[in-house]
Amino acid sequence: MLPAAVLEKAQQEMLDWRDSGMSVMEMSHRGPEYTSIAKQAEADLRELMAIPDDYAVLFLQGGASSQFSMIPMNLLRGKTKADYFNTGAWSKKAISEAKKFCDVNIVTDSSDNNCTTIADKSTWQFSENAAYVHYTVNETIHGLEFDDIPDTGDIPLVADLSSTILSRPIDVSRFGLIYAGAQKNIGPAGLCIVIVKRDLLGHTLDKTPTMFDYQVHADNGSMYNTPATYSWYLSGLVFDWVKQQGGLAAMAETNDRKQRKLYDAIDNSQLYQNPVDAKYRSWMNVPFTLTDSSLETQFLTESKAAGLLTLKGHKTVGGMRASIYNAMPESGVDALIAFMSEFEKQHSK
C-alpha cells in the first residue's frame, strides 16, 4: 500500500513535473531535473535513517533477489565461508544462491519448528572465519521477525530489511550492508535499496559482471545504467511523507499500536490463531488461521466485499495474512479487527 498523499502528489505531477514540460517518466536520468529528484531522495533517506557518511546508498534494480547473488560476489573478499540464519522462505532462497559461491554455515535453523520461533542465542553456531553473517530481519510469509540485532563482533552483518525498513529506527552502524526491495515499505516494485559500508567495496570475485559490482554503482551514483527512474521518484515522495509524519520514531509508535491491537484480537478470539512465538512476531506481516478451516473461503469473500483486500495467506502457509506496512492507516487495522469480530459472532458455535 502507498500513502494516499504520495499517490495524489504523483497524480498532480504526472503530466508536467514542476513546470519542466515533462513527466518524470520522460526525463533523461542524467538531466538536471531528474538529478535533483535523485539527490533529494537519497538525502531524505540518509536523514530518516541517520546513515553515516562512510556508507554508500545505492538505488538498484533486480529486486532483493538479485542481492542474494551480489552479496557473496562482493563480500567474500577472498574467504570461502559465510554464515546464514535460516528463519524462513527468503532466508532459504538467499542460502541457496550463496552456496553457488561459497560454503554456507547455518547459524540456526527455524525450519525445525516450521518457522514459528528463533532458537535461543546460546545455541547459535557462528564460524570463526566467516566473510559475513546474513539474516532476514522479517520473514514475510511466516510472520517471524528478529527482536534484536545479532551481535557478530568484527564480522560484517548483512540484513535483508525489505519488509521492515522505515517502520522504526535502526542503528545502521551495526551493519556492513543492508538491502531492501522497495515494494513493501518504500515504494512501487522495480527498485532495491542497498546501504553498504564503503570499506567493503572493491573486492569482487573474479569475473563478477559489471552490473553486479557495488563499487561500480557507488562510483556512478547508481546510474551506471538507466535506473528505475519512476520508482526512485515515487520512493522519494514516500521518504518525504515519512518525514512529514514525524520520522521513524513516529512511524514506530503507530506501527507498534497497529500490530499489538491486531495480535490481541487474534489471541482473545476463539476462531483465530497465530502460531508464531509472541517474542518473534512480525510487526508488518500478521498471519492467522481459522480454527474451522472450512470458513476460510467465506472469510476471504466477505472481507473483500467489505473492502479488506489481499488477505489470503501465502500458498506455503495457508490461512490469512494481514500486511500492515507503514502506509496502512491505523483505521485500516481497526476495520479489519471489527470485521473479524463480527465474522466470529456470526459463526460461533
Image (tube, rainbow, N blue to C red):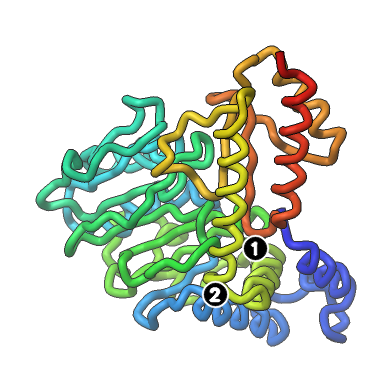
Q: Which mark is residue 71?
A: none
Q: Amino acid at mark 2?
A: Leu
Q: Which mark is residue 228?
A: 1
In terms of image quadrants, where is residue 196? Answer: bottom left
Q: Is residue 349 above or below residue 47?
A: above
Number of other residues with Cα within 10 Å of mark 2, as a class: few under 14, some 14 to 19, many 20 or more: many
Residue 64 or 300: which is nearer the viewer? Answer: 300
Q: Residue 44: horizontal and vertical position, in percent?
A: 58, 79
* Residue 182 appears anywhere in the view: no
Residue at x 52%, y 31% (from the top left corner): 274
Q: Does residue 23 appear left or right of residue 323 in this picture? A: right
Q: Amino acid at mark 1?
A: Ala
Is the residue under label 1 in contact with that under label 2 (CB below 8 Å)?
Answer: no
For mark 2, give the secondary structure. helix
Q: Residue 207: horizontal and vertical position, in percent?
A: 32, 54
Q: Which residue is mark 2?
A: 45
Residue at x 42%, y 70% (from the top left corner): 216
